Amino acid sequence: MKTLNRQFINGRVHKSHIHDIQTETGAASGEQVAEGVLGDATDANLAVEAAREDLQKLAAAVHLCGDRGRSVGEMSLFGRELEKKQLAELIDGVRQRGGALIVRGEAGIGKSALLAEVRALSVTPGMRVLITTGAEPEEHLPYAGLHQLLHPIRGGIDALPSPQRDALRAALGLADEAVPDVYLVGLATLNLLAEVATDSPLVLIAEDAHWLDRSSVDVLAFVARRLPSEPIALIATVRDGEMSRLDDAGLPSMRVERLPEDAAAELLDAVAPGLAPTVRSRVLSDAAGNPLALTELPGTLSSLAQTTPRCRPSCR
Ligand SMILES: Nc1ncnc2c1ncn2[C@@H]1O[C@H](COP(=O)(O)OP(=O)(O)OP(=O)(O)O)[C@@H](O)[C@H]1O
Ligand SMILES: [Mg+2]
């Protein structure tokens, strides 16, 4: 049961994972999976029975009765006032002083959701946002991340001093030159960004920076250390348990913690209104303030309920 709860808290249990969970744990049925997700009952039969009942109520509450609550994309964030304030200060002040911020936290805690807020805040006239997103399959491709970030402003590369221009063109695969010098690529990137930022302050977003390739991260770290003198903000997300070379760059960081109880309850009530009190409190307890868990668990359980034969008649 602990395995299931841990997987769930880490945000990895999804409707499509139910079969994987059954295989991993040897659970014979959806009910046994539900038992693991739902709770801490000591008697397996009682737990299965309780889970079955809960699933019936849950299905009635969140799936079959039409009131599915608000989708996550439709609502603003719960319980993140301080984090939003810190991000807003960085964005609002970027014209006077640039800077970098590493946003850290466990899977599903809301790092990307906060970055979405940053993008919304940056939609002020004249502010430009450039984004790169780390992806596991590309983490060994040199400069793949930098290519994503600079692609929209690549037109400015030709105006750089020639050694920097050649190095950056080579890094981005725009020229045949040999492997470029990282220092020159860093300098070229900084100058290119600074030039663009003279027209409009820049917000650079590096999502899942732990999966960015090493060369791109070295360049981002080089740039990040020089931002205070430019109207440029860099915000990167790094997931707990993953290594990033940005860790060694001495940049300020912000930790995204689990939601406090009241905010977690508000979020759950928004996505899954009308849950039976026992189900609601079990979801809150198992999710332990992780927003992804709070948003996914009702759907997962509802799906389990539908696959549970004894549930079907009463759920119609
Ligand atoms: N404070 C919040 N209020 C409401 N919904 C939230 C909140 N935080 C996160 N969410 C929602 O929870 C889900 C998970 O959040 P998000 O994807 O931002 O997590 P993450 O930290 O980026 O995870 P990962 O490490 O996997 O990238 C998303 O659907 C998001 O919209
Ligand atoms: Mg994310």
Image (tube, helix red, strand yellow):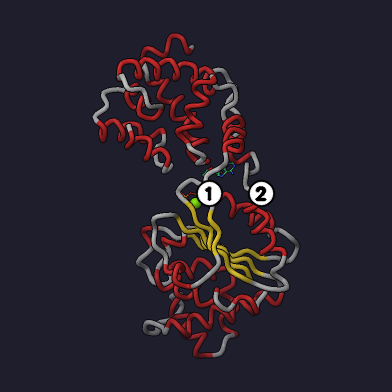
Q: Earlier in the sequence, mark 2 or mark 1?
A: 2
Judging by the rendered image, the residue that carries numbered circle 2 is 81
* Badge 1 element: loop
Image coords of residue 133 (percent x, y):
49, 60
Q: Residue furthest left?
A: 26
Q: Is residue 42 above or below residue 9?
A: above
**Residue that appears at 52% across and 90% down:** 162
Picture quadrant of residue 224: bottom right
Residue 253, percent from left and from top: 54, 63
Q: Along the horizontal axis of the image, is 165 left or right of 93?
A: left
Give the residue at mark 1: 257
Q: Quick check: marks 2 and 1 in contact, CB under 8 Å?
A: no
When asked about the image quadrant of residue 66, the answer is: top right
3D distance between C-alphas at marks 2 and 1:
12 Å
Q: Secondary structure at mark 2?
A: helix
* Viewer-closest of 299 and 261: 261
For residue 48, what is the image quadrant? top left
What residue occupies the far right of the structure in this picture? 125
Give the number of the disc on residue 119.
none
Q: Which residue is at 65% across, 58% downward?
A: 86
